[in-house]
Image (tube, rainbow, N blue to C red):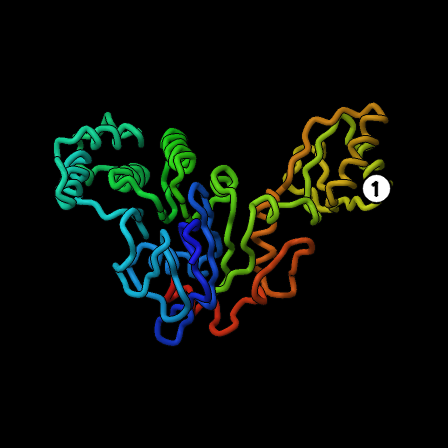
C-alpha cells in the first residue's frame, strides 16, 4: 500500500447488467494534486467518481483512498467530500440553513463561523439568506462546493464543478480549488470544459468506453508532437499564402471558411515548421497579427484519443488498446452510464 497516495486504484471494473461501465481502470492521485477526469459522454467518468465517494462498490480490482482499502460502499475513510450529478440541496431552505443542516448532521455547532466562511469562499455571502429554490445552476454548484468545504476534506471529488457558472462564479471556484490543492488536498474533477482542465489540472486521466486511453501529466497529453490547424492573420495575406506554400511541412487549407475577408489562412503544421514560417514572414517584412490554434492542443488530443483506433495520435502515450466499443456500443453505454 502506498500511503503517499490519496487514491490508488488498480484494475477497477464495474458493470450494470450487460454493460461494462469501467474496464480495468487504474488511477493514482497524490495529495495536493488536481487531477482531471475527462472523456466523452458514456465513458464511465461519473461511475468512477461514485466509487471514489463510496456511493457504489467496484465489481473487481482494488481501491485505496487516503491509504485505506475500500471494499464496500460507504466504507471509505473520513476526509472525503464532493458531489456527483450535482449537489443534493434542500430547495425550501436558505443557503445558510442548508449548510447548517449539514453541520447539524455531523453533530457540530450550527452557529459556527465556518458556515459564513464557506459561503464567503464561494461568493454566496450576498444570497446566504435566500431560498435555494431560486438559485441558478451555477449558484447551486457553488453551494455544493461550500458544503464540501465544511468537512475540511483531504480528498475532494467534483462532477462538472464549473457547470452553469458565470465568469465571477468560475473565478471563485477556481480560486477555492487552487487554494485547497496548495494546502495538500487532493482534488479529482470531471469536466467537459477543456479550458477548466488546462487551468486547474496538473495530471489527467482520459476515459473512452470505460477504459483508460491516457493517464499522466497534462503537458504530455497536450505536447507539441502532433500537427494542429492554426489561424494565421497577417498584413499581406497574398504574400503570406505564397510563403506558406513554399515552407516545408506547412499545409495550407483550401477551405478558409470563417476567415473574414480572406485575410486569414488556416495552416496545418508541427510547431517547428510553424516557427520556420513565422521567421520567414518576419524576414519578408510581413506583420503577424494573429496566430492561434483552431482547436486547443488539449482538445485536439482529446478528440483524437477518443476516436476509433483508426485515428491514433503519434507522440502520446496510451494505456490499454484505446479502442471504442470493445464490449458494448457507445449507444448502449450512454444509455446506462454517465
Q: Residue furthest bottom?
A: 18
- At 83% from the left and 31% from the top, the residue drawn is 280
Q: Nearer the viewer, residue 186 or 117?
A: 186
Residue at (62%, 65%) from the top-left corner? 309
Judge whether residue 226 can be spotted in this image.
yes
Residue at image mark 1? 245
Q: Hey, which quadrant is residue 109 in on the image?
A: top left
Can you say which quadrant of the picture contains the N terminus?
A: bottom left
Looking at the image, residue 129 sits to the left or right of residue 3; the answer is left
Q: Secondary structure at mark 1?
A: helix
Instruction: Count neighbours of disc 1 (C-alpha within 10 A) and say few if under 14, some if 14 to 19, many if 20 or more.
Output: some
Q: Is residue 328 left or right of residue 88?
A: right
Q: Nearer the viewer, residue 77 or 274?
A: 77
172 above or below 332? above
Residues 191 and 24: in front is 24
Question: Is 288 placed left or right of 316 in the picture?
Answer: right
Q: Residue at x 76, y 24 (%)?
A: 287
| In this rendering, position of residue 90 left or right of residue 34 | left
Residue 195 pos. (x, y %): 50, 40
Q: Position of residue 282 (x, y in %)?
A: 81, 26
Asked whether 103 or 136 is in front, the reply is 103
In the rendered view, would you say 23 is above or below 233? below
Residue 338 in view of the camera: no
Name the quadrant containing residue 126: top left
Quadrant, the C terminus: bottom left
Amino acid at each position: 500500500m502506498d500511503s503517499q497516495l490519496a487514491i490508488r486504484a488498480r484494475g477497477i471494473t464495474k458493470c450494470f447488467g450487460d454493460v461494462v461501465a469501467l474496464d480495468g481502470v487504474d488511477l493514482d492521485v497524490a495529495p495536493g494534486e488536481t487531477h482531471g477526469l475527462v472523456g466523452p459522454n458514456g465513458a464511465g467518468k461519473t461511475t468512477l467518481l461514485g466509487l471514489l465517494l463510496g456511493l457504489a462498490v467496484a465489481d473487481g480490482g482494488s481501491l485505496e483512498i487516503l491509504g485505506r482499502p475500500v471494499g464496500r460502499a460507504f466504507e471509505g475513510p473520513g476526509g472525503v467530500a464532493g458531489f456527483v450529478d450535482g449537489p443534493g440541496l434542500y430547495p425550501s431552505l436558505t443557503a445558510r440553513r442548508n449548510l447548517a443542516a449539514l453541520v447539524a448532521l455531523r453533530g457540530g455547532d450550527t452557529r459556527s463561523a465556518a458556515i459564513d466562511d464557506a459561503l464567503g469562499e464561494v461568493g454566496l455571502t450576498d444570497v446566504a439568506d435566500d431560498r435555494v429554490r431560486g438559485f441558478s445552476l451555477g449558484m447551486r454548484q457553488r453551494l455544493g462546493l461550500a458544503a464540501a468545504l465544511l468537512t475540511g476534506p483531504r480528498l475532494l471529488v467534483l462532477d462538472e464543478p464549473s457547470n452553469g457558472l458565470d465568469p465571477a462564479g468560475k473565478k471563485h471556484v477556481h480560486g477555492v480549488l487552487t487554494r485547497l490543492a496548495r494546502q495538500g488536498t487532493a482534488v479529482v474533477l470531471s469536466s467537459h470544459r477543456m479550458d477548466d482542465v488546462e487551468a486547474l489540472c496538473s495530471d489527467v486521466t482520459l476515459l473512452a468506453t470505460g477504459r483508460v486511453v491516457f493517464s499522466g501529466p497534462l503537458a504530455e497529453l497536450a505536447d507539441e508532437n502532433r500537427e494542429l490547424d492554426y489561424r494565421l492573420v497577417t498584413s499581406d495575406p497574398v504574400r503570406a499564402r505564397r510563403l506558406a506554400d513554399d515552407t516545408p511541412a506547412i499545409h495550407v487549407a483550401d477551405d478558409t471558411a470563417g476567415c473574414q475577408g480572406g485575410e486569414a489562412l488556416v495552416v496545418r503544421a508541427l510547431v517547428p515548421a510553424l516557427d520556420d514560417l513565422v521567421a520567414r514572414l518576419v524576414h519578408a517584412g510581413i506583420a503577424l497579427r494573429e496566430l492561434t490554434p483552431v482547436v486547443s492542443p488539449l482538445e485536439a488530443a482529446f478528440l483524437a484519443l477518443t476516436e476509433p483506433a483508426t485515428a491514433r495520435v503519434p507522440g502520446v502515450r496510451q494505456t490499454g488498446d484505446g479502442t471504442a466499443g470493445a464490449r458494448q456500443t457507445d449507444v448502449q453505454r450512454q444509455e446506462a452510464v454517465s
